Amino acid sequence: MQHQARLIVSYDGSEKSYVLWNGTESYYKKLRAAYTDIVNDKESEYLYFGFFTLCSATLEYSLNTVLTDYCVNKFGHENYKSYAEGYVNISFAKKLLMSPHIISDGVFQFNENNSSYKNLLELIALRNKILHNKEFLKEIEFPSIADNLDKEKIEFVLIKEPDPIDKLNKDVCLKFGKSLGDFKKFIMDPAFEN
């Protein structure tokens, strides 16, 4: 079972005491419930988006929690904050890549060919496209109007790329959910066993 908090207490009351909460299990619990709804084909227009967003929030919160806990353990409650802030402010994809190396003091690293790792990178990239989507002008092929002045109508085809949110479906969500489960099992849980 994952620990819920790290306590730093003053036994004689002469110094301040501290707690670092680990609320990630609440996220994983909701993730498991949504995963079950997807497996059971519960129909909902927003289920895939809700699950996907919860996956990305859970992953980032988990990474931040593991890194902060590591910093408290490694540098002490007096000196941890600068290190923790530096680590949690690394870009999401780099934070994922670097976390096992950081929290194991260089002993472990991700196998970048591992399918779960690749899936989590895909989750992060798609998250960025969906949650930070932007539209700009795109160049198109359009027939010359000058060459078609004698025609009543000019025929042309515009092909629109699918919106990133439309990539979310049952298979994609289940793939992300399984990969996040692997992350929890092989990275998150062992980090708190030490």
Image (cartoon, helix red, strand yellow):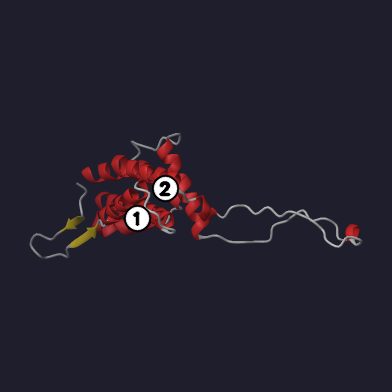
Q: Earlier in the sequence, mark 1 or mark 2?
A: 1
Q: Secondary structure at mark 1?
A: helix
Image coordinates of residue 170 in percent, x first then y, are 43, 47
Q: Which residue is mark 1?
A: 61
For label 2, count other residues whose C-alpha is less than 10 Å away and answer few (under 14), some (14-19) or many (20+): many
For label 1, count other residues whose C-alpha is less than 10 Å away and answer few (under 14), some (14-19) or many (20+): some
Tell me, yes or no, if residue 194 can be seen here. no
Left or right of 63 in this view: 90: right
Tell me, yes or no, if residue 50 can be seen here. yes
Residue type of the residue flagged with mark 1: Tyr
Q: Is residue 113 above or below residue 6?
A: above
Instruction: From the viewer's side, name the closer residue of 164 and 8.
Output: 164
Instruction: From the viewer's side, name the closer residue of 22 and 47.
Output: 47
Name which residue lies at 34% across and 55% down.
61
Image coordinates of residue 68 in percent, x first then y, are 31, 54
The C terminus, quarter of image: top left
Q: Is residue 122 above or below residue 107?
A: below
Q: Which residue is mark 2?
A: 173
Image coordinates of residue 56 in percent, x first then y, are 40, 53
Instruction: From the viewer's side, name the closer residue of 142 and 40.
Output: 40
Distance of mark 1 from mark 2, alpha carbons?
19 Å
